């Protein structure tokens, strides 16, 4: 997969995706996984949302003082308010990539000096000075629940709400 994408992904993200796969946290943050189209080229939500994030980066002229091209933004999740959770790929080592959030509510980007899993844990534990997302369902979540898309479909097929 990484060969087709042309780079490695951060190790915490790879461990998350290998263990859980794509899915949602508390029906609010949808985590993507790399995908390929029928010809073996990168495809799916990561490519689609990265394109949106790149367009927004150019339109908003990024973050003052941060030099980065739009194609260096890689989306790994989106939330229920339209925020995009990304990495800013400024380093060759993917474990050094910082989390970049497009917060739709403020129509602005903000950079967080941590990786994907630390970012999520810090939201659950309210360890940022202010909530980094437009919506608050995960802020201080003591027992966040993750369901893969397959689990969500299985529960829905039984007539139950998977998030109830």
Image: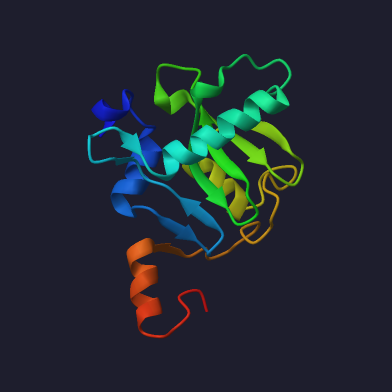
Instruction: Give the residue at x 70% y 50%.
Output: 134
Q: Residue 113, percent across and down?
A: 59, 29
- Give x and y (percent) for residue 92: 41, 16
Between 142 and 6, the residue placed more toward the observer is 6
Q: Is residue 6 left or right of residue 103?
A: left
Task: Determine the residue located farthest toward the bottom in the rendered image.
Answer: 159
Q: Report the quarter where the N terminus lies.
A: top left
Q: Which residue appears at 50% of the width and 22% of the height?
A: 72
Seen in the image, is 126 located left or right of residue 24?
right
List x then y, in percent, for residue 32.
42, 47
For the point 38% across and 53% down, the residue is 22
User: Left or right: 152 with respect to 140?
Assistant: left
Exactly how many numbered labels are in the figure?
0
Please identify the quarter of the rendering in which residue 12 is found.
top left
Task: Please tell me which residue lies in front, 131 or 154.
Answer: 154
**Does 96 sit above or below residue 129?**
above
- Residue 2 percent across, percent down from the top left: 28, 30
Would you place residue 133 above or below residue 56 in this image? below
């Amino acid at each position: 997969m990484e060969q087709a994408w042309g780079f490695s992904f951060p190790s915490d993200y790879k461990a998350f995706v290998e263990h859980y796969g794509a899915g949602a946290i508390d029906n609010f943050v949808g985590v993507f996984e790399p995908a390929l189209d029928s010809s073996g080229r990168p495809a799916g939500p990561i490519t689609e949302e990265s394109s949106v994030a790149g367009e927004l980066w150019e339109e908003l002229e990024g973050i003052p003082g941060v030099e980065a091209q739009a194609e260096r933004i890689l989306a790994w999740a989106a939330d229920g308010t339209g925020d995009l959770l990304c990495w800013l790929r400024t380093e060759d080592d993917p474990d050094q990539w910082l989390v970049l959030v497009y917060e739709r509510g403020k129509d602005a980007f903000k950079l967080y000096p941590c990786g994907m899993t630390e970012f999520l844990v810090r939201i659950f534990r309210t360890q940022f000075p202010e909530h980094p997302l437009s919506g608050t369902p995960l802020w201080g979540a003591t027992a966040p629940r993750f369901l893969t898309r397959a689990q969500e479909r299985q529960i829905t097929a039984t007539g139950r709400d998977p998030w109830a």
